[in-house]
Amino acid sequence: MTPSLELAEAHYEVHSERPFYLGLIEFITSGPVVAMAWSGVEAISVARNIIGPTDGRAAAPGTIRGDLALDIGHNVIHGSDGEDTAAFELGLWFPEGLVEWVRDAETHIYE
């Protein structure tokens, strides 16, 4: 999907007074994105470790940003920073809700 201007503005509303806001809006609406919702035990902290810090130049090799991002303004990926933010963002990006299912492997991984 390619995010609409309205979706981008709602997503980044928290940054609307910051100098980099317009750059965020321009970048995220410049082409298609893959919107995903990850779930699982400590999903937010695990995802943020896989993603790496916002500045790709400071991210460790092997993280998404460490391998693919060189510019803090074009840092390739977004990850929610907490449960409240995740709930808000899921409502924006998936207004019809998520498809829920249990993979068979999960019955052997989680208690």
Image (spheres, rainbow, N blue to C red):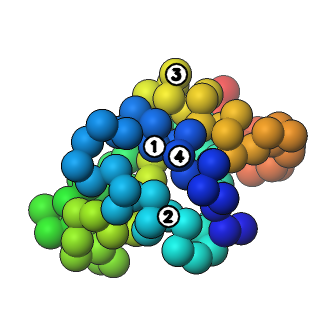
Q: How dense is the environment of label 1, judged by Cα within 10 Å: few (below 14), some, or many (20 and up)?
A: some
User: Residue at 71% across / 68% down in the picture?
Assistant: 1
Given the image, on which type of amino acid does mark 1 rest?
Tyr
Given the image, on which type of amino acid does mark 4 rest?
Glu
Given the image, on which type of amino acid does mark 2 rest?
Ile
Which image quarter: residue 61?
Answer: bottom left
Q: Is residue 80 left or right of residue 22?
A: right
Nearer the camera: disc 1 or disc 3: 1
Earlier residue among tags 4 and 2? 4
Q: Are marks 4 and 1 in contact (CB under 8 Å)?
A: yes
- Which mark identifies residue 12? 1
Secondary-structure class at tag 3: helix
Residue at numbered disc 3: 84
Nearer the camera: disc 4 or disc 3: 4
**Does the image show residue 46?**
no
Label 3 to label 2: alpha-carbon separation = 22 Å
Secondary-structure class at tag 4: helix
Task: Check the image and report above or below for 63 versus 86.
Answer: below
Residue at numbered disc 2: 28
* Residue 110 screen position, x and y as percent: 65, 34
- Which mark identifies residue 9? 4
